[in-house]
Image: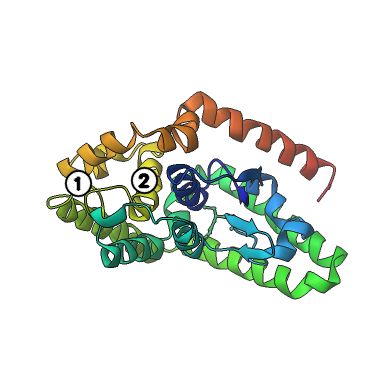
Amino acid sequence: MQLYHHPLSTNSHKVQIALEEKKLDYTPHRVNPLKARNLDPDFFRQNPSGTLPVLKNGGLVICESLPILQYIDSINEPLGDNKINRERVQEWVQKVDEWDSKPFTLSHVPERLLRFFSRFKRRVVIARMAKNPDLANKYHSKLNSMHAMEEQLKSIEALAANEQQLLDLLDAAEDQLGTTEFMAGFAFSIADAAMIPVLARIELLKLDDELIQPRPRVLEYWERMKERPSYRKVIGRYSSRLKMMKLIVPSICNVGIRSLFKKY
Ligand SMILES: N[C@@H](CCC(=O)N[C@@H](CS)C(=O)NCC(=O)O)C(=O)O
């Protein structure tokens, strides 16, 4: 199996945690969306929405994290055996999937940095459109979706609705953890693989005091999840500020140089 992912991508984390928990063999390929590598024609041809993660297994290509999670769980024995409630697993993975982490994350990124990357990405899409006429319609749709995200980030109502959805998700998790040890029962399942990256994103943005601390069961669960080798391997090793900088600074330099020389 081949996994196209990025260490800062929440949706990539979900499927990588599931792969690690299931101890499946896979080859990770890093695709850096900050450098607009997700818009390279080879990658874009297999996933015209240009998003991560993408899982390839032989001729099978799956481009959305939810069906990827479900596919991973269908290989050999599903995670959690008979210690979990399968319907609840599906409810949870669906619920987590319905919350879009992108506007939440981007609304906490400094505006100048956001503008720097979006301007570059827009230019890359336009250049790629001209160079790859067979993909022009797909690049055009990508441009539209980037524009829609920029509009969403300008709308106080849209951001408030996105945050409310996250608060509801956390409240529902707090209730759930009052009766079960994990999100869908008494063992780790793909529902936990989906939930961990949400909590990691909150912590990365330093919003844990506000969003995790007031929910004691979520807090205890989060501390427990961070002990798992899958978390440490997939997210923990990038969670310090220094490691984060090591991922972001080279991308800023690369984008700065390519913008200067108009190398899109
Ligand atoms: N619904 C998609 C969303 C994927 C998504 O938005 N991925 C982000 C990273 S977490 C991405 O690829 N962003 C780059 C872009 O949209 O250009 C999924 O669940 O896989």
The spot of residue 34 in percent (x, y) is 64, 45
- Colouring mode (rainbow / by chain / secondary structure / one colour): rainbow
* 262 or 61: nearer the viewer: 61
Is disc 2 placed on a helix, strand or loop? Answer: helix
In primary-sequence order, the first of circles 1 and 2 is 1
Please give the name of the residue rendered at 87% of the width and 63% of the height, measured from the top-left corner: 131
**Residue that sits furthest to the front in the current view:** 76
Q: Which mark is residue 252?
A: none
In the picture of the structure, the residue carrying the numbered disc 2 is 196
The spot of residue 44 in percent (x, y) is 72, 61
**Residue that sits furthest to the bottom in the current view:** 137
Locate ligand 1 by image quadrant: bottom right
Please give the name of the residue rendered at 69% of the width and 50% of the height, measured from the top-left corner: 36
In the picture of the structure, the residue carrying the numbered disc 1 is 181
The spot of residue 197 in percent (x, y) is 40, 46
- Viewer-nearest of discs 1 and 2: 1
| Three-letter code for the amino acid on which mark 1 is drawn | Glu
Please give the name of the residue rendered at 64% of the width and 58% of the height, measured from the top-left corner: 56
